[in-house]
Image: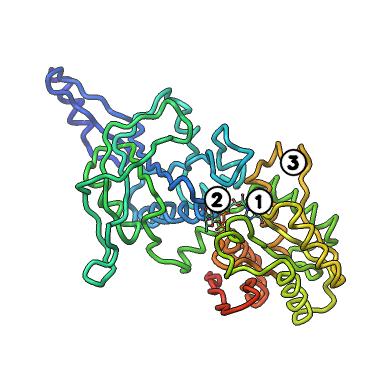
Amino acid sequence: SVFTIIICVLLQTPTLNSDIYCDSENETCTRDISGEKFIFYDVNPPEGFNLRRDVYMRFAIMLAEAKRNGRKRNWHLVLPPWHNLYHWKNDKSDPIPWSSFFDTVLLKSYTSVVELHEVFSNIQELKIDRLYVLQNYPNAFENGDFTEKWKVADTCNNYERSFWGYKNISVKEEICINFQGKISQLWDVIALHPADKHVMFSHGEIPLHDTYGTKTYWDCRRSMVFNKQLIEKSEQYISKYLNCHTKLCSNYLSVHWRRQDFAQYRKNKVPSIAGTARQIDKAIKNFNSYIYKVYVATDAPFSVLRQLETELTYYGYTVFYYLPSDDDIETFKDGGLAIIDQIICSHAAYFIGTHESTFTYRIQEEREILGFYSTTTFNRFCPDKGQCEKPSKWTIVH
Ligand code: GFB
């Protein structure tokens, strides 16, 4: 009817946040007033918490930068719940929202992010329009050069879909993409199907930051603040046991002593227990010989931690570590307890970390944000014998 056509014409006035669908057979138009679009992503299952935090930043920056140029106003990034993480032996059941670990108000102040459960606040089931399964090119250095590129792949690698344990998520179409280079190229992939509203990328770890360590990077990093409960719990510990009541403590040294797979498969890169104690003692003597408290964050079994404690006691130090109560384990879970370790390490006068551990990198970033001299931060454990390159310094940019 004429009336419907008029409505159609009126509605077709371009607006930023609306999509109009007209069905010419029935002469009806419907307007989706929300017009909101969502990016979902997932990460290779064996990757740990702290690499995943970096993958989040790549996606968040990709969206924030596009919005900064006035584009993609109706796009949102969905925070993938923490589910079934390989290292979290006690948290294998329910998906954990980001609010359990981070201040989501601050995450949202950086760019438009939503928790997955928020997407389900007014729908029962979600059909993702397109799932792009990202995969590496068979040869990253074709013709000797690493060039930026992507293409729809001829063959697909195996990909296990779990959708974070949600049974009511499915996919309309799956496309495999060989991908290499900067994450902002994903906008070109999305443009393959401009009408899509729910787009997902698996293997979100494959695309790289457009720029690393720049102001853009740090603006996003600063918005990743841990939630209040975790901060308060850590500060209570620092005040009660380490006797420090300020942000920049002067009276204890902290270490991130990554063991488990590092001690097993990277034997020539990590020190022995006695070697670790020797290096801590040497660092304290060089830095400030009045320090006698050492906080140890570690994934080592308790018996191994006690051996390090014995060695350090022999040198005259008092050793501290966070021993969670059953209540703490229930409340904070493996992820939260690891964060408490990270926060306590961040406030120490001097920090020594483990080479090539993303857990250590995130502590170093936190210390940069707090304002410590970088000489007190970018220090690593060396193997007992052999070479020990200096750690890279990623200092803050304001
Ligand atoms: O975060 P993450 O991946 O850093 O470490 P890496 C893996 C997990 O180990 C953390 C636990 O999420 C914690 O659950 N963990 C490690 C710790 N250190 C500590 C600690 O000091 N305290 C507590 N409470 N927990 C990657 C691995 O580990 O290293 C990859 O994720 C791979 O699978 C790679 O093995 C080489 O970067 O250290």
Q: Earlier in the sequence, mark 3 or mark 1?
A: 3
State left or right for residue 161 relative to residue 32. Answer: right
**SS at badge 1:** helix
Q: Quadrant of the N terminus?
A: top left
Q: Is mark 2 within 8 Å of ligand 1?
A: yes
Residue wearing tag 2: 49
Quarter occupied by residue 127 = top left
- Does the rendering let one see residue 379? no
Q: Earlier in the sequence, mark 1 or mark 2?
A: 2
What is the crowding at mark 3: few (fewer than 14 residues within 10 Å), some, or many (at least 20)? some
In the rendered structure, which amino acid carries the disc numbered 1? Ala
CA–CA distance between discs 3 and 2?
Answer: 19 Å
In the rendered structure, which amino acid carries the disc numbered 2? Phe
Q: Are dots 1 and 2 in contact, CB under 8 Å? A: yes
Residue 130, image x and y in percent? 29, 38
**SS at badge 3:** helix
Check residue 328 in the rendering and tell me which mark sits there, or answer none. Answer: 3
Q: Is mark 1 within 8 Å of ligand 1?
A: yes
Quarter occupied by residue 319 = bottom right
Check residue 233 in the rendering and tell me which mark sits there, or answer none. Answer: none
Q: Residue at x 43, y 47 (%)?
A: 44
CA–CA distance between discs 3 and 1?
Answer: 12 Å
Name of the residue lying farthest toward the bottom: 286
CA–CA distance between discs 1 and 2?
Answer: 10 Å
What is the crowding at mark 2: few (fewer than 14 residues within 10 Å), some, or many (at least 20)? some
Quarter occupied by residue 193 = top left
Q: Earlier in the sequence, mark 3 or mark 2?
A: 2
State left or right for residue 192 relative to residue 365. Answer: left
Residue wearing tag 1: 338
Q: Residue at x 26, y 71 (%)?
A: 145
What is the crowding at mark 1: few (fewer than 14 residues within 10 Å), some, or many (at least 20)? some
Camera-side residue: 235 or 1?
Answer: 235
